[in-house]
Image (cartoon, grey):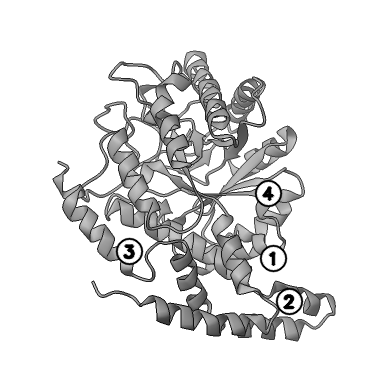
């Protein structure tokens, strides 16, 4: 594939862009540095189609399904880590890596999810230290026989509910070990699939059981310097099309009461909803937000995010109010129909690109116009800012981060596929 551009032309274009932004009071050099410093948590499950390391032949319960059969998925921890490292070499800026519980490495022993310990993640923690990639964590309430009826923490069966409570408690213990190992809190997100395929007669009881289960889980103290708790809603899932116990209303109220973070997933709301509008409302009542950047397409909530209007608006909302210190930026998607490393790369680069664009916006001028009641000026500035030479700054950011510029990463993925992925059966 043809090289996108040489260093001299990239630097020359950047100098012109820097001058253009400077006329609006924006220091492009400082913005590039700031954009690279925001950590993006990359999700491990894109690399293996949400399969995990338990040896299951297929999904058993839980409302999650990765469709497609593109060759070369990771089959074990070594392959998954190698693929992630290669993807990281194509993605600019600081990264984290988010694991699910069922990516434990137990040495071939059968250890159920309520019995897993930090020792089953020692290889992950050693990798995290060596690569300086902090780990985030997620309990896995799916692909398990005890999730077959579609209910876990909200189950009416006390034995099933007790299993999943133990599982979540074990997850928080492991996450705390991650945080101690890496010197920064492991963001630990609870999402459950619990719900009904058709109309339920009783919406209250499952939610009451869910609240009681969450209370029991979160009442077990963990060092706040090692773990950040979050809860995540969903509009619907596979097998829960008519009712989801953990709705947005439920979790926003719960997170407010417990003073923990609530997760907003871009694919987990009605297509006409804009989560950019939810950010300021929620932050008046909760200490922070975990945002999952994904893309909803019809019934599927987890397509690869693009540099879309929706993603850009979320980033602008965060940067305009200078609240990025209250936000955990994370990816959440899984597409088995395309090259999985390309999916990681496209999603992460799109988010980094949107963060850069938001940081480059002369938002101070917008606020001045708004506060002065000059709404025509605000609208005019918004339109003029759209044609500022953003792409030249993005190329410079990639150059400074020592990752491929433009489309050059496609050729590197093609080489990796030929040399590594094509040999996996």
- Classify residue 400 as left or right of residue 328: left
**In what quadrant of the picture does the N terminus appear?**
bottom left
Camera-nearest label, 2 or 3: 3
Find residue 375 and report its horizontal and vertical position in percent: 76, 82
Query: Is residue 71 visible in the rendered structure shown here?
Result: no
Q: Is residue 214 visible?
A: yes
Task: Give the image location of residue 350, x and y in percent.
Answer: 46, 63
Could you tell me if the residues under marks 4 and 3 are in contact, i.e. CB atoms within 8 Å?
no
Q: Are circles 4 and 1 on residues that touch, CB within 8 Å?
A: no
Q: Position of residue 320 (x, y in %)?
A: 69, 65
Question: What residue is shown with label 1?
Answer: 320
Q: CA distance from mark 1 to mark 2?
A: 10 Å
Q: Which residue is mark 4?
A: 326
Disc 2 and disc 3 in contact, CB within 8 angstroms: no
Mark 4 to mark 3 CA distance (whole Å): 32 Å
Q: Tell me, yes or no, whether the two marked residues, 3 and 1, touch with CB atoms within 8 Å.
A: no
The CA span between labels 2 and 4 is 23 Å
Q: Label 2 to label 3, Cα distance in Å?
A: 36 Å
Q: Could you say which is closer to the camera, residue 397 or residue 336?
A: 397
Q: In the image, what residue occupies the spot 73% across and 76% down?
A: 366
Element marked by disc 3: helix
Residue bearing the label numbered 3? 409
Q: Label 1, secondary structure: give it.
A: helix
Determine the CA span between mark 4 and mark 1: 13 Å
User: First in sequence: mark 4 or mark 1?
Assistant: 1
Q: Is residue 375 above or below residue 412?
A: below
| Relative horizontal placement of residue 47, taking residue 307 as reference (left or right) | left
Identify whether 173 is placed above or below 352.
above
Q: Which residue is mark 2?
A: 366
């Amino acid at each position: 594939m043809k090289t996108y551009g040489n260093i001299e032309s990239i630097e020359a274009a950047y100098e012109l862009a820097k001058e253009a932004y400077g006329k609006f009071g924006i220091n492009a050099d400082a913005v590039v540095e700031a954009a690279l410093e925001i950590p993006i948590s990359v999700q491990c499950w894109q690399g293996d189609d949400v399969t995990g390391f338990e040896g299951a032949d297929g999904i058993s319960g839980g409302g999650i399904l990765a469709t497609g059969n593109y060759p070369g998925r990771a089959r074990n921890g070594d392959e998954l880590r190698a693929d992630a490292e290669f993807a990281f070499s194509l993605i600019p800026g600081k990264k984290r890596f988010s694991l699910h519980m069922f990516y434990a490495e137990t040495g071939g022993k059968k250890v159920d999810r309520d019995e897993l310990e930090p020792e089953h993640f020692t290889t992950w923690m050693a990798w995290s230290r060596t690569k300086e990639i902090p780990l985030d964590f997620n309990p896995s309430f799916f692909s398990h026989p005890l999730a077959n009826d579609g209910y876990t923490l909200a189950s009416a069966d006390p034995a099933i509910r007790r299993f999943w409570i133990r599982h979540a408690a074990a997850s928080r213990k492991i996450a705390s070990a991650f945080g101690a190992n890496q010197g920064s809190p492991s963001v630990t997100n609870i999402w459950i699939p619990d719900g009904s395929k058709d109309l339920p007669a009783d919406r209250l009881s499952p939610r009451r059981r869910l609240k009681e289960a969450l209370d029991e889980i979160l009442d077990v103290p963990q060092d706040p310097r090692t773990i950040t708790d979050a809860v995540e809603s969903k509009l619907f899932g596979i097998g829960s099309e008519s009712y989801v116990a953990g709705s947005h209303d439920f979790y926003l109220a719960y997170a407010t009461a417990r003073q923990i973070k609530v997760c907003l997933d871009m694919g987990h709301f009605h297509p006409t909803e804009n989560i950019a509008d939810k950010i300021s409302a929620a932050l008046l009542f909760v200490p922070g937000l975990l945002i999952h950047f994904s893309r909803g397409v019809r019934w599927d909530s987890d397509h690869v995010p693009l540099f879309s209007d929706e993603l850009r608006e979320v980033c602008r909302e965060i940067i305009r109010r200078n609240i990025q210190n209250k936000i955990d930026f994370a990816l959440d998607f899984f597409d088995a129909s395309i090259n999985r490393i390309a999916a990681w790369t496209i999603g992460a680069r799109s988010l980094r690109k949107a963060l850069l664009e938001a940081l480059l916006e002369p938002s101070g001028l917008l606020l001045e116009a708004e506060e002065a009641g000059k709404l025509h000026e605000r609208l005019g500035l918004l339109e003029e800012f759209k044609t500022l030479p953003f792409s030249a700054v993005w190329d410079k950011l990639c150059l400074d981060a020592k990752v491929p510029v433009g489309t050059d990463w496609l050729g590197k993925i093609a080489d990796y596929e030929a040399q590594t992925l094509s040999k996996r059966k």
